[in-house]
Amino acid sequence: MMAQHQNELDEFEPTIIPSDPLILIPAISKENLEKETTWTRRFSGIFYTLFASFLFVSATFTIKKIGVDLLDALLLRMILQATIMFSFVVYNKYTLVAHQPRELFLQILCASTDALGFFLYFLAVRYVELSDVNTLAYTRVVWTVVLSVIVYRERPSIGTLLALPLTLLGVVLVTQPTFLFPSAQSSANTVNYRLRVLGFIMAITCALTSALNVLSYKQLISTSKQIKPSVINFQFSFTVCLFLIANQFYKVFYLKSVTSLSYFISWPYLLSSIVCLISILGSILIQKGIKREHPAVFSLLSAADIIYALILQNIFTSVRSNFYALLGSALIISSVVLIGISKIMNERARRDKIKRNNNANNENEKC
């Protein structure tokens, strides 16, 4: 009875989803091949993913419009999230630290890269429009596949070879460096150009760290039987809290900007904190979406972040995305579509091969 109860706990424990699950193709087994998915369950995965993207983008956009620093608004949410996850881990007596040096290194790498990418994303939103940050961060899908080819020495597919130049061209069109676009109008001419460049660098670095996070997460869950996903989730939340607290010390001791108590009890900050807490629902829906949807399809649906941000930006702000920025976003989305289609076709071929082998084995058993 105790073992059965423990299995139920592991099945329903909160899980952390890596930055992008495209490379984490589920294992193909006979049970998976025979499993049928109803139309309701199929479309629920799509709905969860799209609605989660809307919650995340609208929450970030709303906080930025309120005028509260996103890193300040996240403080209450991340402290609460880390506390809940720590209580869950302690209650279930999960192992917090891996015993093997290699697993410990992967555990540290996984938590630090995920937290750094999370922190850099919201830091980049300070200086660059949300739509541009989402577009550049979305390149994580391509960087993940490229890094997997290098690390695992896989033979690159045609989709990967076509997606890489499209991604690079899309990044150039979104960032629009002055040495290539001397007469092009910036998509946000009210922001200092140097700060915009800093924001672009942060967004691209966020994409690269997110790609590294996917690879380290994949290695960790495939080699470690002790470390549960909820433990990684707690360590991610705790690391983000450290980043946010360090940001407060940076503001006080370096920028000499002392934040008074009235700031944290003002209605803009309280409203922003509530919006951040509501966005936790988006994280839960993302987990449901990835469990019910193919990883490649999930990655394609995540492009809704870019579309939602563009719609909100062009409706509720005076900033208008120019042709080059829109074209760059379209190229980056197209590169992910190519990789997604390639992944789906390869998995379908593997499934067909397994089905043929199972049918051949059944016929041999009958004979």
Image: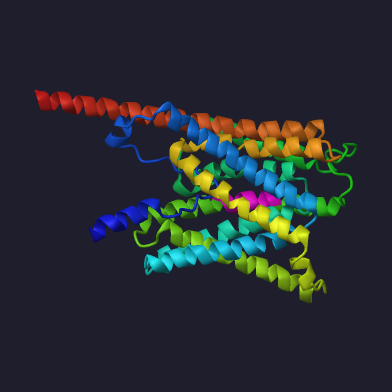
Residue 99, quarter of picture: bottom left
Q: Image quadrant for the C terminus?
A: top left
Q: Is residue 276 magenta?
A: no
Of 15 and 44, nearer the camera is 44
Count of all numbered marks drawn on residues in the image: 0
At x 68%, y 70%, the residue is 246
* Range of magenta residues: 203-211
Percent position of residue 190, x then y? 89, 47
With respect to residue 253, does 308 lie above or below? above
Residue 202 visible from this viewpoint = yes
Of 356 and 68, nearer the camera is 68
At x 75%, y 32%, the residue is 326
Percent position of residue 111, x then y? 53, 61
Percent position of residue 329, x then y? 70, 35
What secondary structure prevails in the magenta region?
helix
Q: Image quadrant for the N terminus?
A: bottom left
- What color scheme is it? rainbow
Asked if residue 313 lies left or right of residue 141, the reply is right
Asked if residue 321 lies left or right of residue 33, the reply is right
